[in-house]
Image: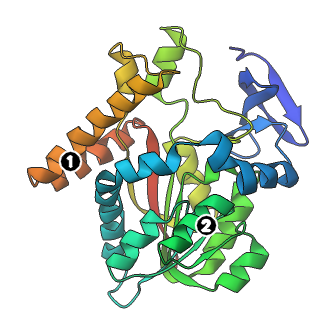
Amino acid sequence: MTKSKKRTWHQHQGLILETKNGFDVIDCSLCGFKHIVPIPTPEELEKTYKHEYYTREKPLYLERYREDLDWWNMVYDERYEILEKHLSPTRRRILDIGSGPGFFLLRGKERGWITKGIEPSNQAVLHSQELGLEIANDFFSKETAKKLGRFDAINMSLVLEHLPDPVHFLRIAYESLDEGGVLSSSVPNDFNPFQNVLRDTLEYEPWWVAPPHHINYFDFSSLRKLLERCGFEIVHQEASFPMDMFLLMGENYVGNDALGRECHEKRKRFEMNFIKAEFRELKQALYKNLSNLGLGREAIFFAKKKFY
């Protein structure tokens, strides 16, 4: 790993943290978060996400999603509960950006929400429509946002890491929310302390660096600053389970799909047992405290559009 060199690329400048697949990951002083250079073009991204992502990059995604659906619904219920806490009972219109196979919106519909999604993958849109959901088969942009309308809540789960310009994207999302609306956003928590121990002390290759699919590499601090910069007020933050902990305990699932699946099953049991024991609030407190330490595999924020 090279930490002493700087890279400048079309005004982007920062220390090079990693190099992979012909891309450098820089800690960009202009953007305030880590990202790759060069940044892929919109044309390259469209080819990947419209036609290839679920068939080539994630061939087992839908099958495994269905296997995990009880656990996912637990996750989704908790996220809807946080949204409902910060919105009046009459405000239940939600847009899911990057809605994938549609299960998040389906759960919202079951809870009484008026749901809409936008998703570039043809395969994922077809699956969502088979569930009876209203999904636009497109990328979220200034033009498509006008057609979609305005919402009380917007969800974007594991989206911002894929975008060439997350600042522009968040500002469009901001304008798509009514006053006091709430954004829910999750991103991989990359270059976190557990990962740094694995890389620097235990000589793991940085498996989380995955260009060109992952363009941006956020942590709790950089995502918080980005959301605030785009006009949002943070109302809640939490982490997801720190999967990297399995690696620290000697279970090297990197490149081992079967072991990775076993570790995921353990994580599911851990969380579902909290719910079974009616210790939901304890689980939430645990994940909130992990986020304060910068730990957890994902950084999850709920942020409100300010009243002016």
Position of the N terminus by quadrant: top right
Q: Quadrant of residue 222?
A: top right
The tag on residue 253 is none
- Residue type at numbered disc 1: Met
Q: Quadrant of residue 216?
A: top right
SS assignment at label 2: helix
Between 104 and 6, which is closer to the camera in this rendering?
A: 104
Residue at (62, 79) in percent of width and height: 176
Position of 75 relative to 210 (above/below): below
Residue 16 in the image, given as x and y percentages of width and height: 74, 24
Q: Pointer 1: residues within 10 angstroms few (<14), some, or many (20+)? A: some
Q: CA distance from mark 1 to mark 2?
A: 29 Å
Sooner in the amino-acid sequence: mark 1 or mark 2: 2
Between 237 and 100, which is closer to the camera in this rendering?
A: 100
Residue 159 in the image, given as x and y percentages of width and height: 60, 54
The tag on residue 272 is 1
Among all residues in the image, which is located at the extreme top?
Answer: 202
Residue topped by disc 2: 125
SS assignment at label 1: helix
Residue at (77, 25) in percent of width and height: 21
Position of 84 relative to 97 (above/below): below
- Residue type at numbered disc 2: Val
Position of the C terminus by quadrant: bottom right
Residue 64 in the image, given as x and y percentages of width and height: 43, 45
